[in-house]
Image (cartoon, grey):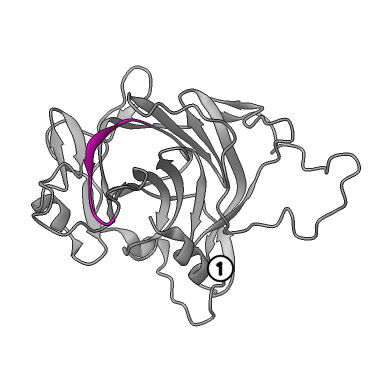
Amino acid sequence: MNRRNFMKASSVVGAGTIFLPLQSLAQVAAPKLPPSGADGWVSLLNGRDLSGWYSMLQKSGKGVAEKRNMVLMEESMLHIMGNEEGKEPAEPGYLATNQEFENVHIRLEYKWGMKRFAPRTYSKRDNGLLYGLVGEDKVWPTCIECQIEEGDVGDYFMVGTRGVQDEHFNGIFGETLGPEGWSGPPADRRLPLGSPPTPGKFDPSNFRKIKDGNFEMLDGWNTVEVIWQGDRSAHIINGRAVNTASKLEQPDPQNPGKFIPLTRGKIAIEIEYAEIWFRKIEVKFLI
């Protein structure tokens, strides 16, 4: 997404801004998820249709992406932007779950397709896994993004939200992190020896938080995982934690200009200007 302009516009939450309460998010009563497998994982794709999901486009609104075949289930996989080039102007958006989630391990597998659409015919292919999606459906919604973009997979984009990137002086994220979450507090935030204190360094911010490490494959299947536990999360690419953050916060719908912990929300997949396949999107609830 073109988040630079969005980030500038959202860096200060105005007192007059209205945020919908979390309870108003439901489209309808969300259907129950299918039972988990023996390993505890629950698939969010049924291999047949997009039951349990809805689409939102920047200009055309809800439910249009399916009609244009911008999103569809094909060969038991989610196929995004496989539609005919030039037939309809491309526009960004997302495919979101009706269901909300909290304390969850999210896992997906993706592979880039060949098509790229104007105005990004020569740009890096871009997508994203959104989680903690709350409030109004719009492009772009209040959420946290685990970036899926060539060269940047695992970055954080705090879209109307904010948080603190964990320290990683030795280049390592995810210490004390396991498949069921963290066994200890966030990484030590003491400054390196000889470093002067920086006021506000560990206050939540809405800036992009850049990952440390390159483990994606441009021409093959990749596994992206997000472990979201309370107000903390980790981005894991092909088995390596490349980014972690804590103090995740969303605007308080009851007190404009204030923030509260972001611990619950929908999951979504971006619709951008590049073709991409997802053969797996699943969740496992943390104990």
Q: In the structure shown, which secondary structural element does the residue marked by tag 1 occupy? A: loop
User: Residue at 55% across / 52% down in the picture?
Assistant: 208
Q: Is residue 28 visible?
A: no
Q: Is residue 57 visible?
A: yes
Disc 1 target residue = 11
**Kind of residue at disc 1:** Ser
Residue 171 or residue 167, whichever sits in front: 171
In which image quadrant can residue 183 be found? top right
Residue 259, percent from left and from top: 58, 65
User: Residue at 67% across / 42% down in the picture?
Assistant: 166
Residue 64 or residue 136, whichever sits in front: 64
Q: Which residues are magenta?
A: 108-119
Residue at the outermost bottom position:
16
Side of 51 relative to 36 (left or right): left
User: Residue at 20% across / 45% down in the picture?
Assistant: 81
User: Residue at 45% across / 65% down in the picture?
Assistant: 6
In which image quadrant can residue 22 be found? bottom left
Is residue 114 part of the magenta span, yes or no? yes
Residue at the outermost front position:
122
Is residue 234 part of the magenta span, yes or no? no
Residue 83, percent from left and from top: 12, 45
Q: Is residue 93 above or below residue 75?
A: below
Residue at the outermost top position:
38
Dot 1 crowding, Cα within 10 Å, few <14, some 14–19, many 20+: some
Side of 253 relative to 257 (left or right): left
The N terminus sits in image quarter: bottom left
Q: Is residue 145 above or below residue 160?
A: above
Task: Considering the whole magenta stretch, tell me its main secondary structure.
Answer: strand
Side of 240 relative to 283 (left or right): right
In which image quadrant can residue 261 be found? bottom right
